[in-house]
């Protein structure tokens, strides 16, 4: 398949710029892969499509306030975007920088509240490596000084509301620069209703990186390479998923990030492996899914790797027809938009 096989017409007015007042108030489209039928509902009704014994796997990553505005030691303004923490004992990060003149190695950057950074090296293009220093806990200072990095298609500055609503209610492990947005619809009440129904809710961590926003720049999809993202699969999650597969119970992934982690951290026998590593899996039509039986996901950008993953799971023609219906029904798209359940 080629890149333009995943294009569709999307009016800009359907790109959600703000969250709804209540998380669970979003709309839901339910796709049945067997019958090739789509049904419209409210997200608050999603519990009705689950069965006792289902395993729901969620990504518990937490978005960090990754945008830092400061000044170079020469006085010029600079914006630094934290992308990925590098291995080691100190707070050295691969970063993107925006300023009138690129910072040189050894240059000191100041961001306020005692937070400073030193450019240690160039890093792989287009990144700079920056070592951060501050009095006290780095995460705490970053929480006060940094800004939540909203996606580029949300054309406004982040507000205090975004610090709450651009996180899932189960966000725990800090490290993402973008939210696993399918999880934004869930509330504590919906999670409890699922548990009451007999659904086993398990967590994994995949720290979502900038690659989720990067466009595919090649018409030949085989030439596209995904950015690496750090993941952790806990032992109890691997055990619960493997037992469900063994017993013929469904495993439902909350979001494309959970899906990619589950389908990457699997051995030759089709068993999910506990542990941690870096995931660069690109799922597109033709992919052989070995773990997931269902997927909860938002509505994605035309020609995006996220749309390709959904098309791989449910079928390109079926998915694009569902997207055309979503446009006709005035569904809200992308991070703060509406939701889709595929079974």
Image (cartoon, helix red, strand yellow):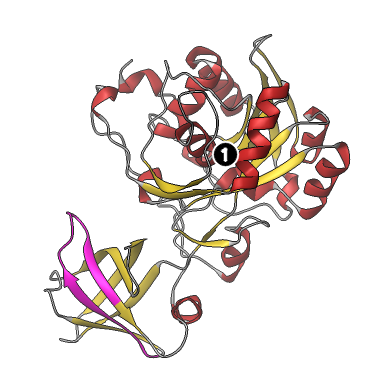
Percent across and percent down for residue 41 are 76, 30
Residue drawn at the location 57% of the way across and 58% of the way down: 166
Q: Which residues are magenta?
A: 114-131
Residue drawn at the location 27% of the way across and 31% of the way down: 224
**Taken as a whole, is the magenta stretch helix, strand or loop?**
strand
- Specify the quadrant that holds the N terminus: top left
Residue drawn at the location 44% of the way across and 52% of the way down: 151
Percent across and percent down for residue 98 are 24, 66
* Side (left or right) of 254 relative to 51: left
Quadrant of the image occupied by residue 38: top right
Counting labels gives 1
Query: Which residue is farthest right?
Result: 196
| Callout 1 secondary element | loop
Badge 1: residue crowd in 10 Å (few <14, some 14–19, many ≥20)? many
- Specify the quadrant that holds the C terminus: top right
* Residue behind mark 1: 255
Classify 40 as above or below 130: above
Judging depth in this view, the residue of 250 and 103 nearest the camera is: 250
Residue drawn at the location 62% of the way across and 64% of the way down: 164
* Side (left or right) of 225 relative to 335: left
* Side (left or right) of 126 relative to 332: left
Query: Which residue is farthest top?
Result: 35
Q: Is residue 290 magenta?
A: no
Judging depth in this view, the residue of 118 and 111 nearest the camera is: 118
Percent across and percent down for residue 47 are 80, 36
Percent across and percent down for residue 120 are 18, 73
Judging depth in this view, the residue of 90 and 306 nearest the camera is: 90
Observer able to see residue 231: yes
């Amino acid at each position: 398949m080629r890149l333009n096989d995943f294009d569709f017409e999307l009016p800009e007015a359907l790109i959600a710029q703000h969250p709804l007042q209540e998380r669970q108030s979003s709309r839901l489209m339910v796709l049945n892969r067997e019958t090739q039928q789509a049904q419209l509902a409210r997200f608050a009704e999603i519990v009705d499509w689950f069965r006792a014994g289902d395993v729901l796997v969620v990504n518990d990553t937490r978005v960090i306030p990754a945008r830092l505005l400061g000044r170079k030691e020469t006085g010029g303004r600079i914006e630094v975007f934290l992308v990925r923490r590098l291995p080691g004992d100190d707070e050295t990060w691969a970063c993107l920088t925006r300023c009138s003149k690129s910072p040189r190695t050894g240059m000191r950057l100041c961001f306020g509240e005692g937070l400073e950074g030193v450019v240690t090296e160039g890093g792989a293009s287009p990144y700079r490596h920056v070592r951060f220093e501050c009095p006290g806990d780095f995460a705490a200072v970053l929480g006060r000084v940094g800004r939540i990095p909203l996606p580029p298609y949300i054309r406004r500055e982040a507000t205090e509301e975004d610090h709450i609503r651009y996180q899932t209610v189960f966000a725990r492990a800090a490290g993402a620069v973008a939210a696993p947005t399918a999880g934004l619809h869930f509330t504590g009440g919906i999670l409890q209703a699922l548990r009451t129904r007999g659904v086993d809710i398990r967590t994994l961590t995949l720290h979502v990186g900038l690659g989720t926003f990067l466009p595919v720049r090649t018409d030949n999809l085989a030439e596209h390479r995904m950015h690496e993202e750090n993941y952790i699969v806990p032992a109890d999650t691997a055990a619960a998923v493997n037992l469900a597969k063994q017993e013929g119970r469904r495993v439902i992934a909350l979001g494309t990030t959970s899906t990619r982690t589950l389908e990457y951290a699997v051995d030759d026998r089709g068993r999910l492996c506990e542990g941690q590593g870096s995931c660069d899996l690109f799922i597109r039509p033709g992919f052989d899914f070995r773990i997931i039986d269902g997927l909860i996901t938002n509505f994605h950008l035309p020609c995006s790797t996220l749309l390709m993953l959904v098309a791989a799971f449910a079928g390109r023609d079926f998915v694009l027809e569902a997207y055309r219906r979503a446009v006709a029904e005035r569904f809200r798209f992308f991070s703060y938009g509406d939701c889709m359940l595929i079974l």
